[in-house]
Amino acid sequence: MNDTANIASRINAYIAQGPDWAQAQCNTLRSTILAADAKLAEIWKWKGPCYEHNGLVCGFDMAKSFVSITFFRGSEMADAANAFNHCVDNAHNRSIRFEQHEAIDTALITRYVQAAVALNQAGPKPKMEGKRIAMPDELAQLLATHADARIAFEGFAPYKQRDYIEWIATAKRAETRQQRLDKALANLKAGLGLNDKYKA
């Protein structure tokens, strides 16, 4: 069995393990993604189906009560339809979550997939120039208080540390900053970087 057939078989098995409503939604997402751009390659990554062209574009997965499609550079997309309703606080990813038996707007998914492909074709997002953001006092206090979180943080590559620093530092409201600190603590205790694959 070649790699393409093996991946297809693996994704078939992944979809088949879900309830009927989730299988139907996953099959709709899969066929819509593949039809959106012939250049997309179907791959298996992070324990689920993903699609790439000039880098990762999107992927879909199943949870107990919903199915979602994630765009890996969603934070850079326009979201003109205001469709992103899941993982919206992630630094890079954005997801559209579909509840049980919810109809999927295939025309919208097609537009979003094509926009994501175009984003990859345009190249990486330019890096912002300027001085590096200092670690927020609240994050420093969290790391000082929780040794396991500090050990995980210090073991990360600089870019993963920077993801957490910038994410927390850019929270405009105290409530949002606290929510991000709580999520950061949970992630760090699990040994996860901020942008590691979200799983519900």
Image: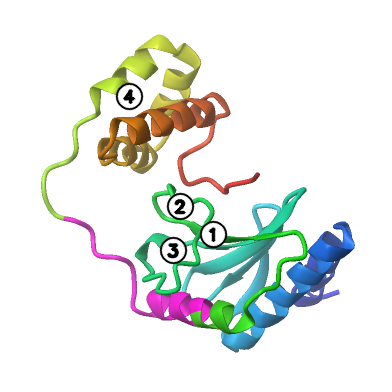
Badge 4 local density, few (<14 within 10 Å), some, or many (20+)? many
| Label 1 element class | strand
Name the residue carrying label 1.
95
CA separation in Å, label 1 and label 4: 26 Å
**Residue 20 in view of the camera:** yes
Q: Residue at x 47, y 25 (%)?
A: 185
Residue beneath disc 3? 74
Q: Are marks 4 and 2 in contact (CB under 8 Å)?
A: no
Give the mark toward the camera: 1 or 4.
Answer: 1
Where residue 38 sits, quadrant-wise, is: bottom right
Residue segment shown in magenta: 112-128
Q: Secondary structure at mark 3?
A: helix
Q: Secondary structure at mark 4?
A: helix
State which mark lies toward you, 2 or 3.
Answer: 2
Nearer-the-camera pick, 85 or 115: 85
Separation of marks 2 and 3 at Cα, in angstroms: 9 Å
**Which element is circle 2 on?**
loop
Amino acid type, callout 3: Gly
- The dot on residue 88 is 2
Q: Quadrant of residue 35?
A: bottom right
Q: Which image quarter: residue 36?
A: bottom right
Question: Which numbered disc covers residue 139?
Answer: 4
